[in-house]
């Protein structure tokens, strides 16, 4: 009933699409949903981002316009009803990196090289004004869901994250607190599309960038290469790091940003499983844990590794999280 009501409310952006075939598309961890419209040889995607759900479609439009002005490939906006939360978007197709690589793993180097080049191109231009810009302390504090959800559900006790947050804030301040760039935040294989008919950096279609903010250059590279949903070949990860920035200073920044991101994801995935009824996220936690352990092995994170008190995601721990009640 709610889905039908939302479709009725979307009529303001659907002029000219009467009688279109309407097919739901896979969503993500957010409240957004997507529907593909097909009418003859015309295609479009209706994005439904309900008001007060955490994402503002106006941000999608603003950041998308910025990306397009740089010669990148966000979906064009055909029509918008910002107050109701609807965007009618260009359909960039189905060739998600994750889908292509599941069938053709040998394409990984080509696709990830293109995606890395997009980040370098993006960072070479000033970011839009007015974006959130967190301090090192705020980035460190963002890992607390790992204790409040992951540790609490696994052990029955959230513990005290203060020492780990303080150690991570120090590491971020020392190694990953330089000049900011625009980061897209969820830059990974399920949000990137291959558009080989286009040229250069435009060959990478970009999705899910509406929460973009100011951050460190390595953040989106970590998101790309330490993917929670698929294994990236170690040689691909190392080659892309070297392509992006081969310096020892960047290797330290990459590890620190990776630790922050993967700790935060541990908590978010546990919360999604427990509070949002999405247990499939539990199956991704061991991969995230593996990324975290590799990051913590870097010497600049020794204090974080020493203070961190989280159980490994054994089958028993994951089962306890699955049976946890908020």
Image (spheres, rainbow, N blue to C red):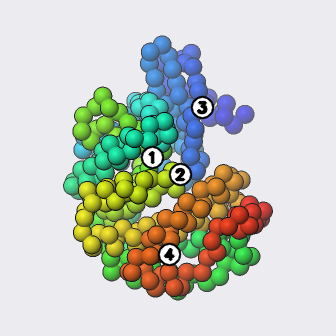
Q: Earlier in the sequence, mark 3 or mark 1?
A: 3
Q: Residue 141 carries which label?
A: 4
Q: Which of marks 1 and 4 is nearer the N terminus?
A: 4
Q: Earlier in the sequence, mark 4 or mark 2?
A: 4
The answer to whether any part of residue 58 appears in the image is: no
Residue at 50%, 69% (x, y): give it. 292
- Mark 1, mark 4: which one is toward the viewer? 1
Quarter containing the N terminus: top right
The percent coordinates of residue 188 (x first, y second) are 44, 50
Toward the viewer: 229 or 130? 229
The percent coordinates of residue 62 (x first, y second) are 36, 46
Q: Mark 4 packing: few (<14 Cα in 10 Å), some, or many (20+)?
A: some
Q: Residue under circle 2?
A: 229
**Distance of label 3 from label 1 (alpha carbons):** 20 Å
Q: Mark 2 packing: few (<14 Cα in 10 Å), some, or many (20+)?
A: some
Q: Mark 1 packing: few (<14 Cα in 10 Å), some, or many (20+)?
A: many
Q: Residue under circle 1?
A: 189
For residue 168, side relative to residue 152 (left or right)? left
For residue 300, side relative to residue 30 (left or right)? left
The secondary element bearing badge 3 is classed as strand
Residue at 71%, 79% (x, y): give it. 157
The percent coordinates of residue 215 (x first, y second) are 35, 64
Q: Residue under circle 3?
A: 24
Q: Which mark is residue 85?
A: none
**Distance of label 4 from label 2 (alpha carbons):** 24 Å
- Mark 3, mark 1: which one is toward the viewer? 1
Residue at 27%, 42% (x, y): give it. 201
**Distance of label 2 from label 3 (alpha carbons):** 21 Å
**Distance of label 1 from label 4 (alpha carbons):** 27 Å
């Amino acid at each position: 009933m709610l889905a039908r009501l939302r479709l009725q409310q979307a009529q303001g952006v659907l002029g000219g699409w009467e009688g279109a075939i309407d097919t739901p598309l896979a969503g993500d961890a957010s409240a957004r949903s997507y529907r593909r419209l097909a009418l003859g040889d015309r295609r479009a995607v209706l994005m439904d981002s309900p008001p007060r759900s955490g994402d503002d479609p106006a941000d999608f439009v603003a950041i998308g316009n910025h990306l397009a002005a740089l010669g990148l490939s966000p979906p064009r906006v055909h029509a918008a009803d910002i107050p109701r939360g609807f965007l009618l978007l260009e359909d960039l197709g189905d060739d998600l990196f994750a889908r292509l690589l599941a069938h053709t793993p040998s394409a990984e180097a080509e696709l990830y090289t293109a995606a890395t080049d997009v980040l370098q191109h993006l960072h070479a231009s000033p970011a839009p004004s007015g974006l959130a810009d967190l301090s090192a302390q705020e980035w460190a504090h963002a890992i607390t869901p790992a204790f409040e959800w992951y540790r609490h559900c696994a052990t029955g006790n959230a513990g005290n994250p203060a020492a780990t947050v303080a150690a991570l804030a120090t590491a971020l301040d020392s190694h990953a607190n330089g000049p900011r760039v625009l980061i897209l935040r969820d830059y990974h294989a399920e949000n990137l599309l291959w558009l080989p008919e286009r040229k250069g950096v435009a060959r990478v279609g970009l999705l899910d960038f509406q929460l973009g903010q100011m951050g460190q250059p390595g953040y989106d590279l970590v998101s790309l290469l330490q993917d929670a949903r698929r294994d990236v070949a170690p040689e691909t990860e190392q080659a892309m790091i070297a392509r992006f920035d081969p310096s020892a200073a960047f290797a330290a920044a990459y590890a620190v940003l990776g630790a922050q991101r993967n700790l935060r994801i541990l908590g978010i995935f546990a919360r999604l499983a427990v509070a949002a009824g999405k247990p499939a996220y539990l199956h991704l936690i061991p991969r995230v844990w593996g990324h975290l352990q590799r990051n913590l092995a870097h010497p600049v994170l020794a204090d974080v590794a020493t203070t961190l008190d989280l159980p490994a995601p054994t089958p028993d721990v994951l089962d306890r999280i699955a049976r946890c009640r908020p």
